[in-house]
């Protein structure tokens, strides 16, 4: 895409589905304007996956300044709140912030409620109860204000709301009502969301996964095999579980690749849906 229509002064935000070319665009803008490339992708923060999460290469990182890539250990939890705290001190210089995680951009441009951390024992209690009784039981326990606004078809969000109420005695809706001002209000930035044609994107997803294999994704998965825990946030790297299953002898490589590319396509579809719903005021750039 042409970049001459994108601001040279304002902070630039680039969102888009996986494999849509976000990182290449960000680097082009960084080279043009002397910007720092800041990661807004929830999986590219993890040190244990470079190839499989399509993090910028070591050569890319050496060529231009990058931040918040691969700085979190694979066994650590890293939330939107962690990311927002890490990004705040980087905003005193020209930046292009790029990624596919819409919640990070929401927090950056709309603010994030400062909800206390949920203790592990509360999360374990919620996990056990959801497994035994289903998310409807957790939903029934929520305070009326939170229950009225929550997505009732999203068990993860229902559990999160239940955990917050259980841990703090205060409903999630009340915490959200105290949301502080955003670090970068939309009015002061250039927000761009890439909108690729579906067949074009699916073909890119398929090609990219085979390129990842050629670059050593299977060896990267092998390095993650000892102590593999699918519950870790870093284990959500698309294709990770499938390659691990292959290494354990549970899937032929061809089947693992097929499952991984399908999962990536499905993830891209969820991203596109989310962006349509939550980024209506962003500048849309159609691809190809």
Image (tube, rainbow, N blue to C red):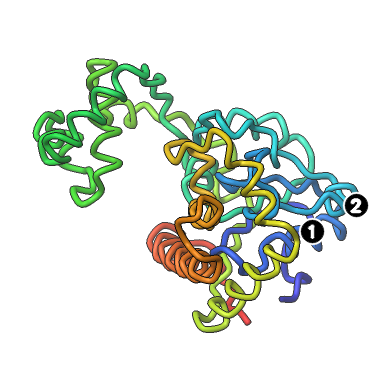
Mark toward the viewer: 1 or 2: 2
Image height check: is 148 above or below 287? above
What residue is drawn where x is 53% and y is 47%?
Answer: 105
Residue 29 at x, y = what percent? 79, 60
Image height check: is 182 above or below 245? above
What residue is drawn where x is 50% and y is 55%?
Answer: 249
| Disc 2 element | helix
Image quadrant where residue 159 sits? top left
* Extreme-right residue of the structure: 63
| Disc 1 element | helix
Seen from the viewer's position, the closer of residues 225 and 11 is 225
Image height check: is 125 above or below 56? above
What residue is drawn where x is 60% and y is 62%?
Answer: 192
Residue that badge 2 annotates:
63
Quadrant that contains the C terminus:
bottom right
| Lower position in the chain sequence, tag 1 or tag 2 | 1
* Extreme-front residue of the structure: 249
Is any atom of residue 280 visible in this view?
Answer: no
- In-image side of 239 versus 21 (left or right): left
Image height check: is 259 above or below 43? below
Residue 95 at x, y = what percent? 74, 46
Quadrant that contains the N terminus:
bottom right
How far separated are the C-alphas under marks 1 and 2?
9 Å
Residue that badge 1 annotates:
27
Image quadrant where residue 210 sits? bottom right
Question: How many neighbours does mark 1 have within 10 angstroms: few (below 14), some (14-19), or many (20 or more)?
Answer: many
> Are discs 1 and 2 less than 8 Å apart at CB?
yes
């Amino acid at each position: 895409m042409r970049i001459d229509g994108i601001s040279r002064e304002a902070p630039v935000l680039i969102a888009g589905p996986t494999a849509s070319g976000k990182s290449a665009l960000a680097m082009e803008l960084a080279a043009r304007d002397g910007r720092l490339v800041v990661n807004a992708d929830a999986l590219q923060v993890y040190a244990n996956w470079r190839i499989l999460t399509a993090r910028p290469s070591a050569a890319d990182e050496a060529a231009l300044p990058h931040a918040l890539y691969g700085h979190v250990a694979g066994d650590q939890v890293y939330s939107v709140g962690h990311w927002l705290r890490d990004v705040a001190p980087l905003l005193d210089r020209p930046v292009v912030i790029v990624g596919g995680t819409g919640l990070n951009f929401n927090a950056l441009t709309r603010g994030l409620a400062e909800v206390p951390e949920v203790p592990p024992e509360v999360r374990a209690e919620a996990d056990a109860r959801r497994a035994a009784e289903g998310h409807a039981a957790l939903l029934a326990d929520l305070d009326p204000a939170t229950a009225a606004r929550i997505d009732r078809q999203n068990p993860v969000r229902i559990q999160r709301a239940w955990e917050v109420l259980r841990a703090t005695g205060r409903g999630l809706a009340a915490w959200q009502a105290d949301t502080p001002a955003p670090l970068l209000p939309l009015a002061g930035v250039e927000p761009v969301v890439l909108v690729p044609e579906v067949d074009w994107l699916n073909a890119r997803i398929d090609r990219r996964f085979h390129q990842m294999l050629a670059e050593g994704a299977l060896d990267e998965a092998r390095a993650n095999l000892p102590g593999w825990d699918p519950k870790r946030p870093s284990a959500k790297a698309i294709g990770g579980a499938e390659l691990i299953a292959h290494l354990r002898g549970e899937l032929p490589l061809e089947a693992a690749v097929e499952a991984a590319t399908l999962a990536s396509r499905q993830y891209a579809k969820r991203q596109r849906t989310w962006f349509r719903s939550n980024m209506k005021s962003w500048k849309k750039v159609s691809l190809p």
